Amino acid sequence: DAKTTQPNSMESNEEEPVHLPCNHSTISGTDYIHWYRQLPSQGPEYVIHGLTSNVNNRMASLAIAEDRKSSTLILHRATLRDAAVYYCILLLSGNTGKLIFGQGTTLQVKP
Amino acid sequence: DTAVSQTPKYLVTQMGNDKSIKCEQNLGHDTMYWYKQDSKKFLKIMFSYNNKELIINETVPNRFSPKSPDKAHLNLHINSLELGDSAVYFCASSPRGWGPATQYFGPGTRLLVL
């Protein structure tokens, strides 16, 4: 299973952008990059995913490096409700769908 | 309506007992999963069913037995509960059991074995 590396924790101020990095140097051409987050006392929640091109949705943006060995999840304006553990996960296109969670990045948002 | 629901939300029981956790999804998805989150917050997949057929069975003690009566339900039965089974168990579903399909998680069942 392809491995990802994320910082253990990050801090942000409310209403400022947040850039959450993820390294995945062993990624293969068919691995999708997924981001999930887990708010306190809740189940994980899908945020965004991509393969090669940058992606935007209502929750966040995903910037993927040209060599695909790293990616960055961008929250454009952090709110207190964005405080969560953010997981960067690689998923093979032919995979059975199982998500391999790492330790994730705990994001703290300060008012 | 909750997309993925689990019952019970909390479960406190004695060692050696047998217990079940139920999961239901109303999203029309084909695939359902069970994950376990331990006290250190590590999330690990346990099982996956696609259209009532087992497709993932990670290294889980055979005291854990999933059952899928139909594709909207995936229940988890645990025999002879042990202290180490204390954890939060999450059910999830996705439209299909392959590829980059989004998974939708339930709220979790917090199991405490005394």
Image: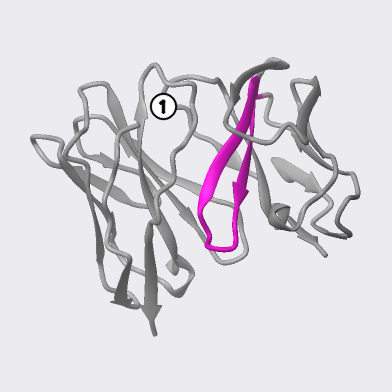
Magenta region includes residue A3: no
Whether residue B69 can be seen here: yes
Q: What is the magenta range?
A: B29-49
Q: Could you tell me residue A91's position as x and y percent?
A: 37, 30
Note whether A79 is above or below A89 in the view shown: below
- Colour pattern: one colour
Q: In which quadrant will I find the C terminus of chain A?
A: bottom left
Q: Could you tell me residue B77's position as x and y percent?
A: 82, 37
> What residue is rendered at 71% in x and 52% in y?
B85
The residue tagged 1 is B100
Observer-nearest residue: B45 or A36?
Answer: B45
> What residue is rendered at 15% in x and 39% in y?
A69
Magenta region includes residue B41: yes
Q: Dot 1, crowdedness within 10 Å: few (<14), some or many (≥20)? A: many
Q: How many marks?
A: 1
> Residue A85 falls in which quadrant of the image?
bottom left
Q: Could you tell me residue B96's position as x and y percent?
A: 55, 20
